[in-house]
């Protein structure tokens, strides 16, 4: 197992602070150029669309982390309200909402339903903003961690990503297929190493080029749909894959598991070393809980593992993450 001295050496190697200027807050998304976006669009030949997002609901993957729960969906107006108010009148409730809703119903045949959702921004398919993880009291590009307050992230928030989209060439690396697993890569003592990323790309006949968004299939989401156990561990990227992503000038990385990286640290004295290296040092966003099953089956069938990927986050002011429904188009 590596130690913190090894970790800090790699951190120095992959750090992109100042690479795109002292005020930069989007990191490796800068690798996505206009030419890259055009290249991604040129990959669409069949018009086949794959939604990579999962359901946001009470049966989602959260709950194991006590600070992060599954979404709570609440109806604020529904058909029962309209029927009851028309039958009994609004005055029995003695509140202005009932009076207003009753007025809408009495004005004619139009009726409506309304709802709201209460959830962590990282409850299901999501992006980690660069402000999500830090160490030594410092965010990406040297911004102070104290700039994230109860009001949100002043620097490196998810809202800063809007200038880039996000859309680019996506590349799927199917580790389930490479390892010959039936469902998912279960062994946390066998993390996905950089050499396996190269082997997967070679086996699939695809190359990873600057500005790509790399999608890692571990099969974890398929396993979750079988068991409903959001706490069940599975293999993820070894922390040394941060250097691989840096060397390939990848724009972002996403996976079908809960944290992209392997749950067993690989660095003595810390947890989530790859989060720290990528988000804080490299400026590379993580996507988690992406459903890659149908996309992987199609890629295996037609032998094409590169596609247009459209994955913009919500522009949540000061948010340190965002839900999304990413789309792969072939």
Image: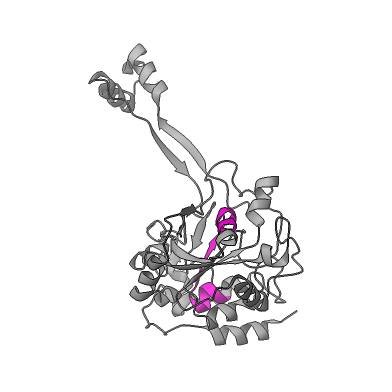
What residue occupies the far left of the structure in this picture?
A: 107
Asked if residue 228 lies left or right of residue 145, the reply is right
Relative side of 70 to 191, left or right: left
Tell me if residue 235 is in the magenta stretch.
no
User: Residue drawn at (40%, 27%), measured in percent from left and top?
Assistant: 78
Please state the horizontal and vertical placement of residue 45, each as a whole percent of the image.
42, 61
Please say whether residue 279 is one of the residues in the magenta stretch.
yes
The percent coordinates of residue 309 (x first, y second) are: 45, 62
- Is there any visible trace of residue 228 in the rendered image? no
Question: Can you see residue 244?
Answer: yes
Q: Relative to 311, does residue 95 appear above or below in the rendering?
A: above
Name the foreground residue: 290 vs 232.
Answer: 290
**Count of numbered circles on the image:** 0
The span shown in magenta is 277-298
Q: Quadrant of residue 161?
A: bottom left
Quarter in which the N terminus is drawn: bottom right
Identify the image's colour scheme: rainbow, by chain, secondary structure or one colour. one colour
Left or right of 88 in this view: 58 = right
Q: Position of residue 10 (x, y in %)?
A: 60, 84
| Residue drawn at the location 42% of the way across and 77% of the way down | 31
Residue drawn where x is 71% and y is 54% of the image: 232
Position of residue 193 in the picture relative to residue 135 (left or right): right
- Residue found at the very far top of the displayed protein: 87
Residue drawn at x 54%, y 83% is 247
Percent position (x, y) of residue 5? Answer: 67, 86
């Amino acid at each position: 197992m590596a130690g913190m001295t090894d970790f800090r050496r790699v951190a120095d190697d992959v750090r992109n602070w100042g690479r795109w200027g002292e005020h930069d807050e989007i990191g490796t998304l800068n690798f996505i150029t206009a030419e890259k976006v055009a290249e991604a669009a040129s990959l669409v030949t069949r018009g086949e669309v794959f939604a990579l997002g999962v359901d946001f609901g009470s049966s989602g993957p959260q709950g194991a982390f006590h600070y992060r729960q599954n979404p709570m969906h609440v109806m604020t107006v529904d058909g029962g309200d309209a029927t009851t108010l028309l039958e009994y009148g609004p005055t029995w409730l003695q509140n202005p909402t009932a009076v207003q809703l009753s007025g809408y119903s009495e004005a004619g045949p139009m009726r409506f339903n309304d709802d709201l959702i209460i959830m962590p921004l990282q409850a299901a398919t999501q992006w980690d903003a660069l402000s999500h993880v830090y160490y030594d009291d410092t965010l990406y590009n040297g911004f102070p961690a104290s700039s994230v307050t109860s009001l949100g992230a002043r620097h490196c928030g998810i809202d800063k990503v809007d200038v880039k989209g996000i859309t680019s060439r996506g590349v799927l690396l199917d580790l389930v297929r490479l390892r010959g697993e039936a469902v998912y890569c279960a062994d946390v003592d066998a993390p996905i190493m950089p050499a396996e990323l190269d082997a997967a790309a070679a086996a699939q006949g695809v190359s990873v080029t600057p500005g790509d968004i790399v999608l890692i299939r571990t099969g974890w989401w398929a396993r979750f749909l079988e068991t409903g156990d959001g706490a069940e561990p599975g293999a993820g990227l070894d922390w040394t894959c941060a250097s691989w992503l840096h060397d390939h000038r990848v724009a972002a990385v996403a996976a079908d598991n809960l944290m992209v990286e392997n749950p067993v640290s690989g660095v003595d004295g810390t947890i989530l070393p790859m989060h720290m290296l990528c988000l804080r040092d490299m400026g590379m966003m993580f996507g988690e809980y992406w459903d890659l099953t149908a996309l992987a089956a199609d890629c295996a069938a037609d032998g094409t593992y590169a596609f247009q990927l459209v994955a913009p986050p919500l522009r949540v002011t000061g948010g340190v993450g965002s839900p999304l429904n990413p789309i792969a188009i072939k």
